[in-house]
Image (spheres, rainbow, N blue to C red):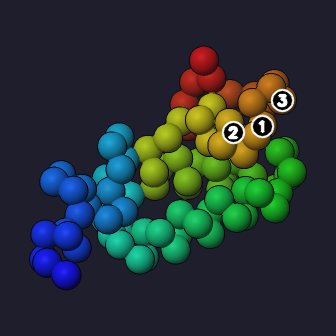
């Protein structure tokens, strides 16, 4: 197997996504993925409005650079009419 076949595409760094926050850029590779996945799993296990839901959502938003609406959509919670927070506007 050649070295070029194993190399990621130009401009790609594991764990760094377009629009990602500075906090997210501090975590790279496996550490970033483990933290991101743990936050998603926590959100999936919580009911909206439950203690910890908004804090976890805010932490995930800061880590990956997604706004609140996009994270809620990723959870399938698009039309719940949840209140706005500082993590980003709902379109």
Mark 2 is surrounded, within 10 Å at the Cα level, by few (under 14), some (14 to 19) or many (20 or more) other residues, namely some
Residue 48 image position (x, y, % from top left) = 83, 45
Q: Residue furthest bottom?
A: 1
Instruction: Look at mark 1 in the image and give the residue it sits on.
Output: 77
Residue 44 image position (x, y, % from top left) = 77, 57
- Marks 1 and 3 in Cβ contact (< 8 Å): yes
- Marks 1 and 2 in Cβ contact (< 8 Å): yes
Residue sitting at 62 percent across and 69 percent down? 38
Left or right: where does residue 53 sit relative to residue 87?
A: right
Residue 25 image position (x, y, % from top left) = 31, 59
Q: In what quadrant of the picture does the C terminus appear?
A: top right
- Marks 2 and 3 in Cβ contact (< 8 Å): yes
Left or right: where does residue 29 sit relative to residue 63?
A: left
Instruction: Look at mark 3 in the image and give the residue it sits on.
Output: 80
Mark 3 is surrounded, within 10 Å at the Cα level, by few (under 14), some (14 to 19) or many (20 or more) other residues, namely few
Residue 86 image position (x, y, % from top left) = 57, 34
Frontmost residue, 87 versus 19: 19
Is residue 85 at all visible to an observer of this figure? Answer: no
Q: Secondary structure at mark 3?
A: loop
Instruction: Look at mark 2 in the image and give the residue it sits on.
Output: 72
Residue sitting at 38 percent across and 58 percent down? 24
Q: In what quadrant of the picture does the N terminus appear?
A: bottom left
Which quarter of the picture shows residue 75? top right
Q: Residue furthest left?
A: 3
- Give the spatial CA distance, label 1 vs label 2: 5 Å
Mark 1 is surrounded, within 10 Å at the Cα level, by few (under 14), some (14 to 19) or many (20 or more) other residues, namely some
């Amino acid at each position: 197997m050649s070295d070029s076949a194993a190399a990621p595409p130009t401009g790609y760094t594991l764990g760094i996504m377009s629009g990602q926050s500075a906090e997210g850029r501090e975590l790279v590779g496996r550490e970033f993925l483990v933290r991101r996945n743990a936050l998603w799993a926590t959100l999936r296990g919580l009911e909206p409005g439950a203690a910890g839901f908004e804090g976890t959502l805010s932490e995930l938003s800061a880590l990956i650079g997604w706004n609140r609406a996009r994270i809620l959509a990723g959870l399938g919670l698009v039309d719940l009419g949840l209140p706005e927070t500082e993590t980003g506007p709902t379109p």
